[in-house]
Amino acid sequence: MHPSSRRLSLLTFRDSCGIILASNSEAILHEPIHIELRRVSKEYKFGGLHQKVLSNVDLIINRGEFVSIIGPSGSGKTTLAHILGGLTTPTDGELVVDGQKMGRARDRRLSQYRNKRVGFVFQNFGLLPQYTALENAALPLILAKMRPRDRMEIAAHALHAVGLGKRMDSYGSQLSGGERQRVAIARALVNKPDIIIADEPTGSLDSRQGDEVADMLLGIHAQYRTTLILVTHNPDIAARAPRTLHLLDGKMTEDAYHAVR
Ligand SMILES: Nc1ncnc2c1ncn2[C@@H]1O[C@H](COP(=O)(O)OP(=O)(O)OP(=O)(O)O)[C@@H](O)[C@H]1O
Ligand SMILES: [Mg+2]
């Protein structure tokens, strides 16, 4: 069944950050198109040569979907994820969010989308070493110019939500890889994103910590109905998503719905 017309029993609930996520009793949801790529290509100029790293990608990701992206190294997974999150703009084609075309770099609509609606999680965690877990988790709110007391409260809630309530004053060097990635997930959550884009979030972790981080991301997706776009080299983690995009040499060679393992 296509996810845009699922019959869902929705509950009203509130998470520890105070996000009201859904309301009403049973309802037929016709979820709006959420993120769309129209004939998107990306080219880099390198030493006078043009390298096409994405070619004519058409894609629709509906609100609340969980999509994994797999493909060999260099196939364009990170480029695609960055375009979907507004970190990079396409050379040709368009990113359309909820029916609105996003502009090129420095477009205000694009930066608002990227900063307010998307939470990013990267392979190397991307934490600032001179800041504590609490300060790292609060970073997006500092950028959003939120009052210090409010942002620390929200960051503390997010750290509690990822099981790090007791490590808020620790610096990155004092945390394990899995804990660092959980701080990065907390940081991705503080803006209450409706899309999480995780680029090989388990790539630097051993299998136990990787599984914990994957479980956490899937749990957030399941609980909050956050759209989850997960780039991974791990076929077992990719198979946990009901839909997988396959990239090869910058082309989307397969876009398949499948039974979840
Ligand atoms: N800023 C850039 N300038 C020039 N070339 C780039 C740039 N970013 C990526 N590329 C090239 O684009 C191609 C796709 O890169 P991308 O990082 O999207 O691949 P990937 O599938 O994520 O690979 P990996 O699995 O190794 O992370 C590669 O050949 C890469 O060298
Ligand atoms: Mg990559």
Image (spheres, rainbow, N blue to C red):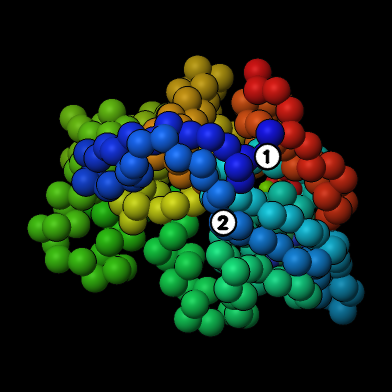
Q: Position of 46 compared to 30: left or right?
A: right
- Residue 20 is left or right of residue 246, and the answer is left
| Residue at image location 64% in from the left, 51% down from the top | 61
- Viewer-closest of 77 and 129: 77
In this rendering, does residue 28 appear at all?
yes
Label 1 residue SS: loop
Residue 104 rendering spot, x and y as whole percentages: 62, 80
> Which sits earlier in the primary sequence, circle 2 or circle 1?
1
Task: Count the labels in the image.
Answer: 2
The three-letter code of the residue at mark 2 reads: Pro
Please determine whether, in this image, residue 215 is positioned above or below residue 146: above
**Toward the viewer: 133 or 121?**
121
Q: Which residue is mark 2?
A: 32
Q: Which mark is residue 97?
A: none
Numbered circle sitting on residue 2: 1
Residue 217 percent coordinates (x, y): 47, 34
User: Quarter of the image holding residue 1?
Assistant: top right
Residue 181 visible in this rendered orientation of the protein: no
Per the image, label 2 sits on a secondary structure element best described as: loop
